[in-house]
Image (cartoon, grey):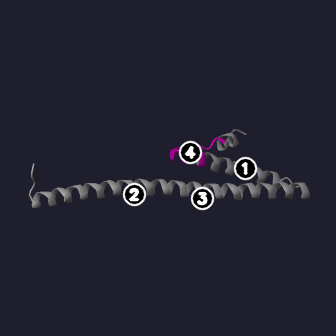
């Protein structure tokens, strides 16, 4: 089977176009996954802030014996649990295993 130069060039162009489309799909998928991981990182940062805020409320309550710190602690704890559930869901969507995260939410 002998192809003319013209037909070889068309075949090569078609193969190149298909390869570029495949690369485009792979890049789009990677960007989507990277965006999900970035959102998870933001939630993780929020969780760290919530934990520090919980410690602050606890110390304030122990030092001042004022019940407003208990209420603030409970509100912050609920926010933290909500963020923890969101983070767990996002990691599951990205097929990232985090068994320690699941055990934290069970507490």
Find numbered disc 2 in the image and state the secondary structure of the residue it sits on: helix
Quarter of image, res 9: bottom left
Say which label, 3 or 1, has the lower sequence index.
3
Say which label, 4 or 3, has the lower sequence index.
3
The residue range painted magenta reads: 87-99
Nearer the observer: mark 3 or 1; the answer is 3
* Separation of residues labelled 3 and 2 (CA atoms): 22 Å
Find numbered disc 4 in the image and state the secondary structure of the residue it sits on: helix
Nearer the observer: mark 3 or 2; the answer is 2
Say which label, 1 or 2, has the lower sequence index.
2
* Separation of residues labelled 1 and 2 (CA atoms): 38 Å
Find numbered disc 1 in the image and state the secondary structure of the residue it sits on: helix
Q: Residue at x 11, y 61 (%)?
A: 5
Residue on which disc 2 sits: 27
Residue on which disc 1 sits: 77
Residue on which disc 4 sits: 89
């Amino acid at each position: 089977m002998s192809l003319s130069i013209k037909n070889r060039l068309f075949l090569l162009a078609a193969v190149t176009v298909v390869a570029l489309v495949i690369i485009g799909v792979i890049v789009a998928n990677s960007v989507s996954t990277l965006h999900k991981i970035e959102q998870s990182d933001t939630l993780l940062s929020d969780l760290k802030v919530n934990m520090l805020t919980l410690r602050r409320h606890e110390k304030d309550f122990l030092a001042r014996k004022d019940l407003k710190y208990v209420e603030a602690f409970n509100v912050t704890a609920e926010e933290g649990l909500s963020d923890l559930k969101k983070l767990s869901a996002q990691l599951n969507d990205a097929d990232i295993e985090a068994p320690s995260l699941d055990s934290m939410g069970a507490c």
